[in-house]
């Protein structure tokens, strides 16, 4: 970007991209629930007819409890991509431009810590649910 401020502005690239992703997810969830009601499965696409995409549906059916594995990937990679990496990149960019202020440090350390907390607890919860789904006893 020529102007880095365009990236983080109120109508910047980051906010616009996040809004578009939110709109797509909300629309998919709304219409998925509207179409299939309370019988909607973990992944909306599992409710779709499998005529044109037999291979994809076969993979989805061969992986038992697919929703739990999607949750694990989301907890691990999603948290890192949404909170941890942006905080690290912001710190590195501001450090290289000699613009590292106390406020930037506090903001990024908070985001990083919140991201690590979310990654650890989300991954633990997903792994616990996977273990429970496959019959491993809870020993806590």
Image (cartoon, rainbow, N blue to C red):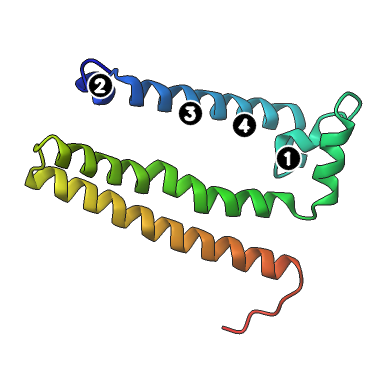
Labels 2 and 1 touching (C-beta < 8 A):
no
Specify the label residue 22 is tagged with: 3
Mark pair 2, 4: CA separation: 26 Å
List the single residue furthest toward the bottom: 139
Relative placement, left or right, of 140 versus 36 is left
List x then y, in percent, for residue 97: 13, 34
Q: Which mark is in front, 1 or 4?
A: 4
Labels 1 and 3 touching (C-beta < 8 A):
no
Taking the spot 59% from the left edge, 54% from the top edge, the residue there is 72
Tell me the SS state at disc 2.
loop
Q: Is tag 3's residue or tag 4's residue first in the polypeptide sequence?
A: 3
User: Disc 2 marks which residue?
Assistant: 10
Q: Is residue 115 above or below residue 16?
A: below
List the single residue furthest toward the front: 96
Q: Is tag 1's residue or tag 4's residue first in the polypeptide sequence?
A: 4
Mark pair 1, 3: CA separation: 22 Å
Tell me the SS state at disc 3.
helix
User: Disc 4 marks which residue?
Assistant: 29
User: Disc 1 marks which residue?
Assistant: 38
Q: Which mark is in front, 3 or 4?
A: 3
Relative placement, left or right, of 8 versus 68 is left
Mark pair 2, 3: CA separation: 16 Å
**Considering depth in this image, is 118 or 4 the residue closer to the camera?**
4
Labels 1 and 4 touching (C-beta < 8 A):
no
């Amino acid at each position: 970007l020529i102007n880095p401020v365009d990236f983080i502005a109120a109508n910047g690239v980051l906010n616009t991209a996040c809004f578009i992703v939110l709109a797509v997810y909300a629309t998919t969830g709304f219409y998925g629930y509207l179409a299939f009601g309370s019988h909607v499965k973990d992944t909306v696409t599992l409710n779709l007819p499998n005529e044109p995409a037999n291979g994809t549906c076969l993979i989805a059916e061969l992986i038992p409890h697919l929703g739990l594995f999607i949750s694990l990937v989301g907890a691990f990679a999603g948290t890192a991509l949404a909170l941890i990496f942006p905080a690290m990149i912001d710190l590195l960019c501001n450090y290289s431009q000699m613009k590292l202020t106390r406020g930037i440090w506090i903001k990024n350390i908070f985001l990083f810590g919140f991201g690590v907390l979310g990654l650890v607890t989300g991954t633990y919860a997903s792994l616990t649910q996977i273990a429970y789904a496959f019959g491993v006893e809870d020993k806590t």
